[in-house]
C-alpha cells in the first residue's frame, strides 16, 4: 500500500519515491505527496522526473492503492527512483478553500442548525450544500462576517488520528457523520480548528485560519426542498 505523505505532511512540495507497479499510463509509487480525488477535493497535478525524463501527473485516484496517471510518453519502469513535484499553487488553493469549508460548515451548524450535505472545492472557488430552506441576504452577510472573524483570529488548525471507538465517543455526530464510513475503517483522521470545529476529514488544510485569507460569499442556489448551496471564494 502506498504511503500517503499528504495525510501528515500537507506542505510537502517535492519528494522521492520508487515506482512499484506500472498499469498502462498509470504508475503506483511506494510513497506519494500527490493527493487523490476525494472528499470534495480534486487531485493534485505536477510532475515526476527520473533519468532525464519528465512526466506530467494529470490524474491521481485512490482505489486498492493510489494510481498516478501520466502524460509524456512511456511511464518509468518498476524499480525506478523518481522525484515528484506538486503544482503548489493549485494545491495551496485547495488547502485554503477546504479549510474555509470547515469554517463555513461550523458556522452553518452553530448559527442556522444547517447540516452540511455536500461540498466541492477548487483552487479559486468552492461551494457547500446544506440542509436549510432558504438563505436571505442578511443570512449570507452574517455567515461571511462570522467566517472572516475566525480567519482574523488566526486559529491553529491541526490534524491527527483517533481510534474509531474514541472518535465516536468524543466527536459531534452531526459534524463527523462517522456512521457513513465503512466499518473496515478503524482509524479516523481528524481535522481540528481549535474551539471551532472538529471533524473526520482526509483532505489537506492550511495550519492556521489566517492563511485562509478573506472569505467572500458569491451567491446562493436552491438545490431542492430544504437544501441550499452557498458559493464562495477567497481573496
Image (tube, rainbow, N blue to C red):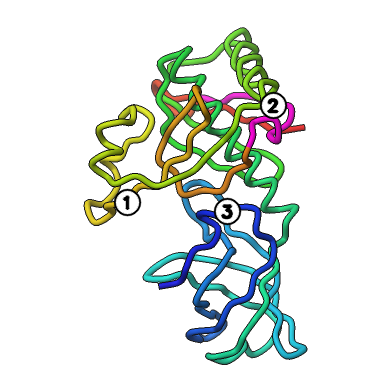
Residue 7, how many percent across, how many down? Answer: 50, 55
Crowdedness near tag 3: few (<14), some (14–19) or many (≥20) residues, C-alpha within 10 Å: many
Q: Which residue is mark 1?
A: 187
Residue 64 sits in quarter = bottom left
Residue 48, how many percent across, how many down? Answer: 68, 76
Q: Which residues are magenta?
A: 208-222
Q: Which mark is in front, 1 or 2?
A: 1
Task: State the residue at coordinates (61%, 7%).
Answer: 138
Q: CA distance from mark 3 to mark 2?
A: 20 Å
Image: 215 above or below 24: above
Horizontal arrangement in the rendering, residue 149 relative to residue 63 (left or right) = right
Judging depth in this view, the residue of 183 and 211 nearest the camera is 211
* Residue 42 image label: 3
Residue 74, how many percent across, how many down? Answer: 64, 90
Sequence-wise, the earlier of marks 1 and 2 is 1
Q: Secondary structure at mark 1?
A: strand
Horizontal arrangement in the rendering, residue 20 relative to residue 17 (left or right) = left
Task: State the residue at coordinates (25%, 32%).
Answer: 169
Magenta stretch contains residue 159? no
Sequence-wise, the earlier of marks 3 and 2 is 3
Q: Which residue is mark 2?
A: 215
Image: 141 above or below 210: above
Q: CA distance from mark 1 to mark 2?
A: 32 Å
Amino acid at each position: 500500500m502506498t504511503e500517503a505523505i499528504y495525510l501528515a505532511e500537507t506542505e510537502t512540495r517535492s519528494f522521492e519515491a520508487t515506482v512499484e507497479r506500472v498499469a498502462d499510463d498509470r504508475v503506483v509509487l511506494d510513497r506519494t505527496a500527490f493527493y487523490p480525488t476525494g472528499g470534495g477535493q480534486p487531485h493534485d497535478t505536477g510532475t515526476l522526473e527520473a533519468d532525464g525524463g519528465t512526466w506530467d501527473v494529470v490524474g491521481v485516484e485512490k482505489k486498492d492503492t493510489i494510481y498516478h496517471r501520466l502524460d509524456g510518453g512511456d511511464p518509468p519502469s518498476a524499480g525506478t527512483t523518481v522525484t515528484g513535484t506538486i503544482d503548489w499553487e493549485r494545491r495551496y488553493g485547495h488547502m485554503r478553500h477546504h479549510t474555509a469549508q470547515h469554517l463555513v460548515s461550523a458556522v452553518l451548524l452553530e448559527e442556522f442548525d444547517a447540516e452540511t450535505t455536500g461540498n466541492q472545492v477548487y483552487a479559486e472557488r468552492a461551494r457547500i450544500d446544506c440542509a436549510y430552506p432558504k438563505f436571505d441576504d442578511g443570512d449570507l452577510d452574517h455567515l461571511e462576517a462570522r467566517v472572516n472573524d475566525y480567519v482574523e483570529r488566526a486559529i491553529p488548525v491541526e490534524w491527527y488520528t483517533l481510534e474509531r471507538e474514541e472518535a465516536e465517543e468524543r466527536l459531534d455526530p452531526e459534524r463527523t457523520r462517522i456512521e457513513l464510513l465503512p466499518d473496515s475503517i478503524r482509524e479516523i483522521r481528524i481535522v481540528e480548528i481549535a474551539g471551532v470545529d472538529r471533524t473526520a476529514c482526509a483532505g489537506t488544510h492550511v495550519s492556521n485560519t489566517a492563511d485562509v485569507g478573506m472569505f467572500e460569499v458569491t451567491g446562493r442556489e436552491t438545490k431542492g426542498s430544504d437544501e441550499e448551496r452557498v458559493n464562495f471564494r477567497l481573496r
